[in-house]
């Protein structure tokens, strides 16, 4: 897929799609949600600002972009 993301960034994206509590925290306060993740500065800034065009340059799919933008979850997400 040609993604150029750190493993920490990939973990954040995965968790956003699976963990409702984390996604809610991210949408309300990205800085708090992203604490403890060893993100590259560019990754952190793009996530914190929810810069979809910038995130797309890192290789996120449309589905992953929708997760970052809205906290959309898969059907496997606990209710």
Image (cartoon, helix red, strand yellow):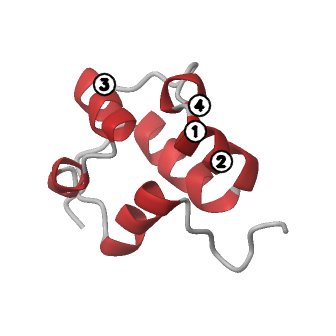
Q: Where's residue 28, x and y in %?
A: 58, 38
Reading the chain from its start, which is encountered first: label 1 or label 3? Answer: 1
Q: Are marks 4 and 3 in contact (CB under 8 Å)?
A: no
Q: Where's residue 23, x and y in %?
A: 62, 49
Reading the chain from its start, which is encountered first: label 4 or label 2? Answer: 2
Point out which mark residue 66 bears: none
Q: Where's residue 40, x and y in %?
A: 30, 25
Report helix, strand or loop for mark 1: helix
Q: Are marks 4 and 2 in contact (CB under 8 Å)?
A: no
Report helix, strand or loop for mark 3: loop
Please name the residue that numbered disc 1 is placed on. 28
Q: Are marks 4 and 1 in contact (CB under 8 Å)?
A: no
Report the residue at 17% width, 48% height from top.
54
| Image quarter hosting the C terminus | bottom right
Q: Estimate the spatial distance between the alpha carbons at disc 4 and disc 2, rounded to whole Å.
A: 9 Å
Please name the residue that numbered disc 2 is placed on. 24
Q: Of discs 3 and 2, which sits in the foreground? A: 2
Question: Which residue lies most toward the bottom here?
Answer: 75
Q: Estimate the spatial distance between the alpha carbons at disc 4 and disc 1, rounded to whole Å.
A: 9 Å
Q: Are marks 3 and 2 in contact (CB under 8 Å)?
A: no
Q: Of discs 1 and 3, which sits in the foreground? A: 1
Please name the residue that numbered disc 3 is placed on. 40
Please name the residue that numbered disc 4 is placed on. 33
């Amino acid at each position: 897929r040609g993604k150029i993301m750190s493993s920490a960034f990939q973990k954040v994206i995965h968790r956003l799609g699976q963990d409702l509590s984390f996604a809610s925290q991210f949408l309300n306060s990205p800085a708090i949600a992203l604490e403890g993740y060893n993100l590259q500065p560019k990754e952190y800034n793009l996530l914190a600002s929810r810069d979809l065009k910038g995130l797309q340059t890192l290789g996120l799919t449309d589905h992953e972009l929708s997760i970052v933008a809205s906290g959309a979850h898969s059907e496997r997400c606990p209710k």
